[in-house]
Image: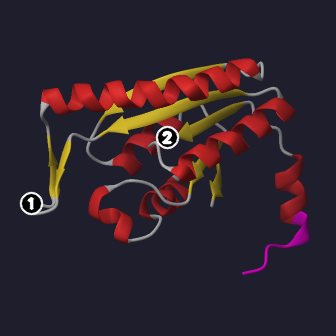
Amino acid sequence: MCIPLIQIYIICCMIFKNILVPYDGSNFSNRAFQKALDVAKKDGSKITIFTVIEGEYSAIMGHSKINQQVIKKQQSAAKKYIYKLESSAKNSNVPVSVKIKQGSKIVNEIINFANSKFNLIVMGSHGRTGLNKLILGSVANGVAQQAKCSVMVIK
């Protein structure tokens, strides 16, 4: 699919003040964060890192179940990863905030959080979503289709 040159020019000239980075600890989400950081430095933007904790995924049952001990471990692990991202943003003089939410439908959680206050979502093309990772980019695709703001998907 070709994007008309005028659309590319308009996208390149936009200034994004509030950037959301859905983060799951994958290499793709790390690259997305770095791209968001580049945009934020250029535009003087604020970054919000957003992580959804799902609970335990059961491949046999095909759903997540809530186990408070698992949730606490996942939150602790997420905070370790995110701390490094926060430090990187602060070292670049980019304001950063973090939101960790518990939920079962990642796309819905991202969309509900993003639609109220962000004008750009920067996310990895693939992530960690249980069996859904067999359907490449299902979360990125869902967010790109439903978001009311611009979405940049990073490979």
Residue 65 appears in the figure? yes
Q: Is residue 121 visible?
A: no
Q: Is residue 130 left or right of residue 63?
A: right
Q: Assess whether residue 113 is covered by the magenta stretch.
A: no
Residue at numbered disc 1: 61
What's the distance in space between the residues labelled 2 and 1, CA to CA?
Answer: 25 Å
Does residue 147 sit above or below 92 in this rendering? below
Looking at the figure, which quarter contains the C terminus? Answer: bottom right
Looking at the rendered structure, the kind of residue marked 1 is Met
Helix, strand, or loop for circle 1? loop
- Residue stretch in magenta: 1-6
Q: Quadrant of residue 76?
A: top left
What amino acid is found at the position of numbered circle 2 in the picture? Tyr
Q: How many marks?
A: 2
Q: Position of residue 33 (x, y in %)?
A: 63, 40
The label shown at residue 91 is none
- Predominant secondary structure, magenta span: loop
**Residue located at (33% from left, 64% from top):** 132
Q: Is residue 94 left or right of residue 24?
A: right
Q: Which mark is residue 23?
A: 2
Quarter of the image for residue 121 reads top right
Residue density around tag 1, few if under 14, some if 14–19, many if 20 or more, within 10 Å: few
Horizontal side of 53 relative to 117 (left or right) equals left
Q: Is residue 111 above or below residue 47?
A: below
Residue 120 lies, in percent from the top left, at 66, 42
Q: Report the residue at 40% width, 31% height from top.
A: 78
Q: Position of residue 115 (x, y in %)?
A: 53, 39
Could you tell which of marks 2 and 1 lies nearer the N-terminus? 2
Question: Is 5 covered by the magenta stretch?
Answer: yes
Q: Residue furthest left?
A: 61
Corner quadrant of residue 11: bottom right
